[in-house]
Amino acid sequence: MIYTRNLKKLYKSREVETMALINVNIDIDEGEFVAVAGPAGSGKSSLFNILGLLDTPDSGEVFFMGKECSRLSQNKRISLRRGNIGYMFKDFNLVDELSVYNNIELPLLYMPYSRKDRQKMVSEILYKFKLDHKRNNYPEELTRLQQQTVGLARATVYNPKLILADEPAGSLDSTGGGMIFELISSVNEAGTTVIFFTNSISEAQRASRIIRLFDGHIVTEAIQKEI
Ligand SMILES: Nc1ncnc2c1ncn2[C@@H]1O[C@H](COP(=O)(O)OP(=O)(O)OP(=O)(O)O)[C@@H](O)[C@H]1O
C-alpha cells in the first residue's frame, strides 16, 4: 500500500539545520492498522506529511499504490491523494462557519460526485457515526469527541484506501479517546488501511503494529497482536 526507502527530511533555518527524518524505511500493507509512536520532536508530523503526500522528502523514495511520489509535482500529488487518502488532524481542523453536514461534504465537492451522490454519502456516514441529530449544528456546538467524530467522518466519507490520523485522541479525555479509537478500528475492519501517530504508548498499543520513532530514526518495530 505504502512504503518508503531511505527517507530524509531536513529543515534549514539561518542558524540551524534539523534532521527530522533519517533513513526511514517503512512498509505498510493494505488493510494494516499501524501506530507510529514517538516523543515530541521525533519526526511524526514530518512523516505524516510525507506519507500523506502533503510534503516531499529531501531524499529517499515514497511509494503509494505502486507509484513513486517523492518527486511528483504538487498537482500530481494532489490528484493522487484526492479520494485515496483521508486525513484526521489533532485539532480537528473543522471549518467553524460550516455545519456538520457541510464539513463532511467538503472533500466531496472536489471529486466528481453529483449532488445526489453527495447527499447519500454524507447521510450514510452521519447515520453510521450516530451524528445524524447534529447534522445542522456548527462545530462550536459540539463536544470535543463529536468534533473529532466529524473529523473522522470527513476523512472517511469518500471511502479512501488509507487514513492518516495525527494524534486522533490528543485533545480528548481517556473515555473520548477510547471511543474515537473504536470508530477508527471499525473503519479499519471495513478494509481501510490506517496509520495513526501518537506520543502515547498506551494509545499505540491499540494498533496491530507499532513503528517507533526517536530523533528521526526508526527504533524498533513490534508486532503487537495477530491481525
Ligand atoms: N518547519 C520546520 N522548521 C524547522 N524545524 C522543524 C520544522 N518542522 C519540524 N522541525 C523540527 O524537526 C524535528 C521533528 O519535528 P516533527 O514536528 O516532525 O516531530 P513530532 O514528533 O511531530 O513532534 P510534535 O509531537 O512536537 O509535533 C523537530 O526537531 C522539530 O523542531
Image (cartoon, helix red, strand yellow):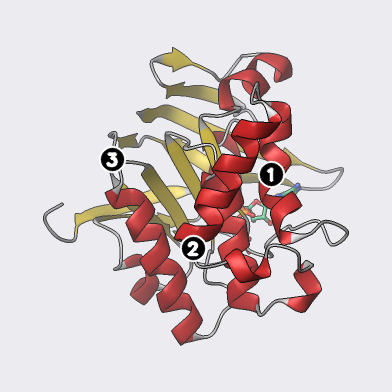
Disc 3/disc 2 C-alpha distance (Å): 21 Å
Circle 3 crowding by C-alpha within 10 Å: few under 14, some 14–19, many from 20: some
Secondary structure under badge 2? loop
Tell me residue 155's x, y (percent): 57, 47
Q: What label does residue 212 carry, if any? A: none
The residue drawn where x is 65% and y is 33% is: 116
Residue type marked 1: Glu
Nearest to N terminus: mark 1 or mark 3: 3
Residue type marked 2: Phe
Above or below, 60 relative to 178: above
81 on left or right of 65 = right
- The one of 220 and 3 positioned closer to us in this rendering: 3
Task: State whether label 3 is within 8 Å of ligand 1.
Answer: no
Tell me residue 76's x, y (percent): 65, 14
Residue type marked 3: Gly
Q: Identify the image quadrant of residue 226.
A: bottom left
To which residue does mark 3 refer? 31
Circle 2 crowding by C-alpha within 10 Å: few under 14, some 14–19, many from 20: some
Secondary structure under badge 3? loop
The residue drawn where x is 65% and y is 77% is: 144
To which residue does mark 1 refer? 105
- The one of 41 and 132 positioned closer to us in this rendering: 132
Nearest to N terminus: mark 2 or mark 1: 1
Circle 1 crowding by C-alpha within 10 Å: few under 14, some 14–19, many from 20: many
Tell me residue 108's x, y (percent): 66, 35
To which residue does mark 2 refer? 129
Task: State whether label 2 is within 8 Å of ligand 1.
Answer: no
Disc 2/disc 1 C-alpha distance (Å): 15 Å
For ligand 1, the image quadrant comes to: bottom right
Circle nearer the viewer, 3 or 2: 2
Above or below, 102 relative to 66: below
